[in-house]
């Protein structure tokens, strides 16, 4: 028996396969095929565009898959959301779809766009958004580069953005958020009733989360006298409780903990000031707290 | 005094030098020279083809060298086999030389090949193999691509294989194993009588084995209540006994161990299920258990 | 408030930015600009040639900067030397400026060069050197390739060298050392009176030193019976005192320490001989002892 | 006044810009912008997806553009087709959209698919195709990888193909051609009424065709006695009439012509057999016959 | 006897060696040496910084060299300027050194800068410029990035520019041109008295000019009826007179000429309009008109 | 019917396939297969090591092949030598196998080596060489790096060399030439009796020779007055007779010829001196004189 797993083809593909590798599962793709094998004989993969993942999962062609919540909602199909995976700043991690209009246009609210042309890749979500507000608009499917269409080809757009910089560069102004979105591990509802498949999907989620948790984190070891322990612990963030173990001499203890890699920049000088010695930062592969 | 060490030129060269680096010995090669220096002033290297390594070592031009056991036996020369090194799947690690015939030929045993032409790169070993069975054959030296020679240029071949896939692709059928082989650290017999050289060769073997052992392994740290310790330990493979140390609070212990990197995929979910917390996987450079 | 920090443009630039990254500070350069941002909103950088760094720092255009002590002295300007940073063998770490003459020339001392032409990139330091000895010479600024100028374009040169190999290759003979030099973190004298800036500069020095200390070092863990502990510790270098902690069984202890990566090559075999087991070498990011 | 020209973004982009360069027009793209300048101050470009080109051209946002005829027809918009450009085997040159079904399915004609699901990227063309035959089907838009959908997600597909190899690899059988397509230079109907723009578009077409004609062709020069001229000319293909010019000695003539590069393989041996001498093949940039 | 030739090390080096190759002289450099051999046994090269070329040539260490006229004048040394070589837009071809001040400063003329600090790489030329105007200034040598110095480290700068874009980007305003400059082949005055060396230098100049002339030019062949010849010739630029030769049939002539590659874009459509046929554009290696 | 053609695998492979491409025959290799297809449906290729080519051709597994004459002679098999192809300086073009001994050894002639060990890759040729001189020696097959074997592993070697530089670098002295060698197109004797195959092989030889002849040659066009023609022609090498054609004005003639690319360096200046104008050098693809 095998778990059939969908990997998003395209911009997220490389980052997803790298994440799987860090999680402990090597995926073997081939330029000639849409299918991929893995080192776990019980898992096989298929490369499917994020936009179509929900269709493949909901119809049971795949048991589970990785895609954005936006495309799940757009599809209108039923799947189970197992885990939210925020593994890449460069890829679509936490993004939002917004309604944007030309900077110098008079439009301030969705209601101002009655009778206008709205260009978007997310046609169904956009339709529901305007229908819910009772605003009649003409929605045109856009194949991309949506942000350059106003004002000649559209009056407003519904587009995905992370920092808003591309919208600003095209002199567009955000007037509302249509929906937020993040990357998800989704599963087929029936597959999750099956013991083997549910366990496989849950273990996959655990290991992916472990690899994501290790990314951008480091281990920190240090020694401190018992009398200074409280001060040193006060410096450490409350992410998880540090492991404290006795040393042979009876006077000192060793502290071992996990911190954000970027936090080391401020924590280490403060640990030093708190009389910690032998401070060592070391790299991690996976973290399951 | 210096240890003169032979590194196999060609397909194993890059992997060997990378292994030496991981073992702690940087080798400096030059595109213009067959000799190479190292960061250990007492070790100097020479790049020699695997087929000729035994000759250089047995005649004392080199004190030790890395080559395949197949070429040692083919040479018929006397050297000391110090350590078997299985450091690269892609290179000739554990391989075997087999007698193969066309799939649709009638030959089933070596004895069926009396009077036939056998093509091989391993002429002496092949001669001894057929002589031991009293089967007269004509053995032709092959410069490569031996597997495409039957049936036009040879009736059977003796060829090296790891998975057999190249033989199958050329529609050949294995009818016997002629000899297995693996990569070896070999040494000159007299050099091993010399205290300085024997110690150098043994330390080299220890460090190479330490680097090979670290390859594909990871460190695993976790905390567990004393009451759950037995269950957590039951999950760990018997590769080596884990290091268990007390924590300050008296109720928990820390466990630190080495596991196969690929095993993490199944072990970590089971540790989590056994109530382990703070599970951290970290990378290793060398392991000497 | 921001710390304005100078990074040396050119041969040291890449190594410096890599060091900052290891220290925990990501620097974002742009091919179009001399300025660079960092992930610490309180630090901004400027890319300035090492030769001009002291001018920028002493005039307060920058609060601190990284450059060689040679160019600080050459400039004749006042700055505060905060930390000596030896982070790259390939770059100008510990170097020295020497007075060199053609191998077969009669010159043996600076005094023999009265009235002669001296080519150098370090005109002011060279002038002071000869003035201090009362030797009148003609000093010509050299744009580079100074070592090929004698004897046609100069009688002697003052040139930087690390190993002397380039001088030997051009058949030059060193007759005196003019000044040694190393890479420095320098700061503006007034900026160091400001609490915010002094603290920022000192933390920067701490983290850079921590990253440098981790470079070329590794962590070493091992277990040993209490009775063998003294022998095992005798093998370890006195770099810092190892962390020794009890194990659960009461008979063994765990030792954790930091050693030079290159020292592992000789230390691990000796630890093994001293009955240590479970010897594991692991990589480090930062070390603050 | 400027001609605004659309270049297809994506798979055809690189080949199109290379063609423009060979035609004599350098296009300067930027990774940050959808617009591009050219060395002709009267031409500016915009990078637009092939699927949307007709919309931009028909609404006058662009004066002309390069796209496939398939997407022009799919859009249902009116533009003028100026020139058919077959410049890249690897890209969509001459292709056809076909109706394909699983190899082992019972479907033989479009009519057999009544009530079935058809997946395609070309929804409008496909709708018209089935409507014209009076066959009611359910057409689903496909985001790509359409050929792997039958039989689980679709009963049949309408997909683009050049050689049919991808369809065969997915075990699909073609049962009808829906429409052929080729790359086109299209123009806005009103823009072609404007003298400046029409002339610019026509010159562009001439130069693009000249560069395409030179691609895969070579020049061939040879000398032949007058008496052998007829035989030599008989070897040359009738692509265009060769240029024949007298030589100084009165007995020989020089022949200069253009041939297909691949034809040289058979033509040159035959010219040699026809007593031609001094046969020289040379490269070409552009050919306007 | 050999001609010793200096090639500018650094930004112009690659373009210069590529030019020599197109001119017919292969230069063999080595990363280990300042000298280079050529395929002409009578020419040997030395890689010298452009700033020091005049010194090497004037002192006779080199017979000839390639450098900018700016550095020749800056050196104040006597050499013979043999040929002006404009071979690379990206490199310093035709440039000018200008006096620039901050955009929003009050300075309008050199005279306004009395008593101010001027930063420049071209100290001597700048000194003479201000001395000639009787304006006393403080000139500081700049190691680079001169354009970022005003207003903190300098009041004005003398800097090289081709298009002025870098100055504008740093908000500087040009108030005068100090000197124009172009790349030159320079020679030692005495060497030019020697027959062998003068001939070598002149042939080198001829071939370099031939290669430069071919760069950016193409050959154009076409056929035209005698009656249309005048019209066709009227289209061709007057760069050189085209070669016109009779064809065998007596009615047509062949025209062969050299044009600017960029001119083809406008010339070919006009030739076609003038009834020319068989228009073929072909690449060139060298042109000596 | 097909011509089966052997291409030498290894160091000559890339250069051979590039030559075939220039000759007009595209070869499609695959990393997975020893066979290769071509754009000529009547030619198929096999990649075979040069050492084994003669065996494949003489036994009729291949109709023709490219290899060195040395390996043909070594094999002792009968094949027909069709054409000598000197297409690559970097590859084994014109080489020679020599007998070499250590520089400081006493050996001066083959006869001095009686009873000694000779290492070589060319065992049979070497045996015949010594047998012909009646000198008994021990010949050992060498897998490579033969030049480093004397004096420890061999007393002398028979090795291939082009310039002798590798032998000198290893302090060896050449005492005799054993055999010269060059790259050959060889064919099976029976295949050359077959009309189809003989014609295919001869055309292949013609086109390969045409491509080789074009390599390193260029076309040269120039105009000259009739009165200066004799002087101009005197400058041109006698490689082939130039094509001279009348120009329209009756006073000038055009000269078109093929010269060595390296000869342009000296010829063009002399043509200019002989009053030639409009001198244009252009690239060639193939030359069949």
Image: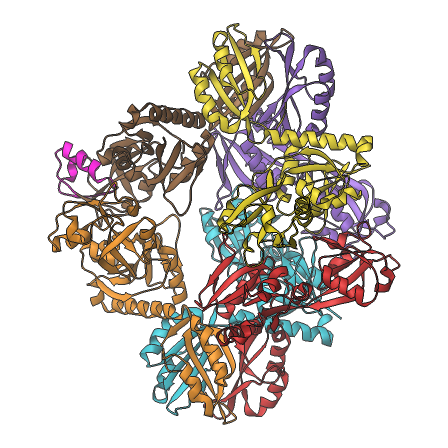
Chain colours: A brown, B yellow, C purple, D orange, E cyan, F red
Q: Position of residue C215 (x, y in %)?
A: 62, 31
Residue ID at (57%, 92%): F227
Q: Quadrant of the N terminus of chain B?
A: top right
| E73 or B118, nearer to the observer | B118
Up/down of F176 relative to D271, above or below: above
Q: How many marks?
A: 0
On the rendered structure, is F269 left or right of B237? right
Q: In which image quadrant can residue B55 be found?
A: top right
On the rendered structure, is A108 left or right of F168? left
Residue ID at (40%, 68%): D215
Asked if residue C200 can be seen in this view, the reply is: no
Asked if residue C132 can be seen in this view, the reply is: yes
Looking at the rendering, the stretch of residues picked out in magenta corresponds to: A110-138
On the rendered structure, is C27 left or right of E63? left
Is residue A118 inside the magenta stretch?
A: yes
Q: Position of residue F121 (x, y in %)?
A: 71, 57
Q: Quadrant of the C terminus of chain B?
A: top right
């Amino acid at each position: 028996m095998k778990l059939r797993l969908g990997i998003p083809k395209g911009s997220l593909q490389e980052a997803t396969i790298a994440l799987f590798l860090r999680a402990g599962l090597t995926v073997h793709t081939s330029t000639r095929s849409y299918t991929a094998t893995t080192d776990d004989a019980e898992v096989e993969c298929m490369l499917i565009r994020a936009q179509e993942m929900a269709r493949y999962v909901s119809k049971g062609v795949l048991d589970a898959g990785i895609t954005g919540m936006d495309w799940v909602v757009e599809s209108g199909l039923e799947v189970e959301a197992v885990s939210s995976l925020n593994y890449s700043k460069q890829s679509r991690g936490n993004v939002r779809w917004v309604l944007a209009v030309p900077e110098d246009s008079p439009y301030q609210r969705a209601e101002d766009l009655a009778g206008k042309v709205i260009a978007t890749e997310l046609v169904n979500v956009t339709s529901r958004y305007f229908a819910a507000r009772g605003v009649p608009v003409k929605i045109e499917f856009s194949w991309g580069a949506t942000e350059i269409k106003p004002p000649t080809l559209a009056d407003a757009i519904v587009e995905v953005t992370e920092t808003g910089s591309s919208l600003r560069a095209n002199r567009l102004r955000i007037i509302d958020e249509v929906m937020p979105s993040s990357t998800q591990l989704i599963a087929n509802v029936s597959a999750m009733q099956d013991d083997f498949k549910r366990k496989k999907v849950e273990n996959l989620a655990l290991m992916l989360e472990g690899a994501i948790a290790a990314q951008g984190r480091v281990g920190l070891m240090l020694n401190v006298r018992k009398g200074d322990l409280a001060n040193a612990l006060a410096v450490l963030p409350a992410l998880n409780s540090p492991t404290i173990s006795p040393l042979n001499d009876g006077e000192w203890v060793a502290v071992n903990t996990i911190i954000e890699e970027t936090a080391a920049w401020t924590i280490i000088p403060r640990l030093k000031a708190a009389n910690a010695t032998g401070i060592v930062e070391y790299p991690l592969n996976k973290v399951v707290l």
